[in-house]
Amino acid sequence: MDKRRLLGYIAGIVAGISYGTNPLFGKALMESGVPIMVMLFFRYAFAAGFLAVLMMFKKESFLARWRELGLLILLGIFFAGSSITLFCSYEFIPSGLATTLIYLYPVIVALIMVFLRIYPSWQTWLAISATFGGILLLSTPSGNAQIRIPGVLLAIGSALCYSLYLIVVNRSKRIRNVSEHTITLYSLVTGAILFAGIRAAQGGSMLEGIDTLGDWGNLIGLAIIPTMVSMLTIAISSRYIGPTKTAVLGVFEPLTAILIGTLMFGEALTAKMAAGIAVCVAAVVFMIVKPGRKSV
């Protein structure tokens, strides 16, 4: 395995793990009464600030050409749209069902790539099928759960937005020479502006629910690990091993969230969930060991 491909797999795993730390910071903020749009605004704004400092330290340019700017803003809309629709889906359907539906994104990515006449290998299709089966074991809602169509559509919309983000980063020739840092920075700034606008339309203070140093600490943690780190490594992984394999490696997100819930919040880990984790990990290992095509 060449170094670029190995780095792509490592970046994809880091992206999934880092994004899976959302509950570690987000749960405490929600319990403190921080509105979702306020949380998302500070999450993206802080992450953009930290990344800008890193880029200044490395003496990287912030500038983008006009022909690149529109696409960079569109990427920000896709990523922010994925966040908004995810949180909104929770108001209509159980989080377990939302997690299952959102993990349709490897399938969506693969189907779009087929439409573009880029065909994933049979190993990748097998990994997609197995990881989706594992997710079903991990997050199938209880029999008395209420399922409402708007929530289902919002969750699928979140998966679609995330899929489009991965594909554009990988396939667009217009931003091929734009660094991962610049792509991520423009996406974060676009998201922060979008969330601020929505919050302004809703009314209310931008500091609502943020009352302690612990709240600010959780916002900073949310901005660095599951946002800045995750977005940077997603961009690297998608470029190095393709959007389909990157999407499959996203299975480390729910796995990490479940382990955090078990270890940090005392949530139960059932035999069915353990089986789901084993299936997902086995599928990812198989895909890495038997990768098939290199680029999708």
Image (cartoon, helix red, strand yellow):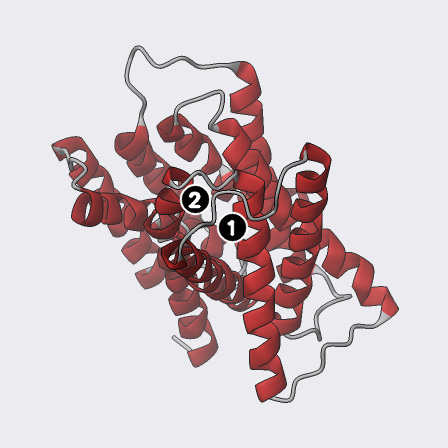
Where is residue 268? Give x, y as percent: 15, 35
- In the rendered view, tell whether residue 286 sits above or below residue 112: below
The answer to whether the residues at label 2 and label 1 have Cβ atoms under 8 Å apart is yes
Identity of the residue drawn at 70% across and 73% down: 178
Residue type at numbered disc 2: Trp
- In the rendered view, tell whether residue 270 sits above or below residue 253: above
Q: Is residue 20 visible?
A: no
Residue type at numbered disc 1: Pro
For label 2, the crowd category at 10 Å Cα-Cα, with few meaning under 14, some 14 to 19 and many 20 or more, is some
Between 286 and 260, the one lying in front of the other is: 260
Between 218 and 102, the one lying in front of the other is: 218
Q: Is residue 137 left or right of residue 155?
A: left
Between 209 and 45, the one lying in front of the other is: 209
Tag count:
2
Q: Closer to the N terminus: mark 2 or mark 1?
A: 1
Between 155 and 240, the one lying in front of the other is: 155
Q: Is residue 278 left or right of residue 244?
A: left
User: What secondary structure is found at the residue carrying circle 1?
Assistant: loop
Location of mark 2 (residue)? 125
User: What secondary structure is found at the residue carrying circle 2?
Assistant: helix
Identity of the residue drawn at 77% across and 58% down: 71
Where is residue 42? Give x, y as percent: 56, 55
For label 1, the crowd category at 10 Å Cα-Cα, with few meaning under 14, some 14 to 19 and many 20 or more, is many
Location of mark 1 (residue)? 120
Q: Is residue 264 left or right of residue 81?
A: left
Identity of the residue drawn at 58% across and 87% down: 57
Q: Is residue 9 visible?
A: yes
The image quadrant where one finds the N terminus is bottom left
Where is residue 13? Give x, y as percent: 37, 61
Q: Quadrant of residue 183?
A: bottom right
Identity of the residue drawn at 61% across and 43% down: 205
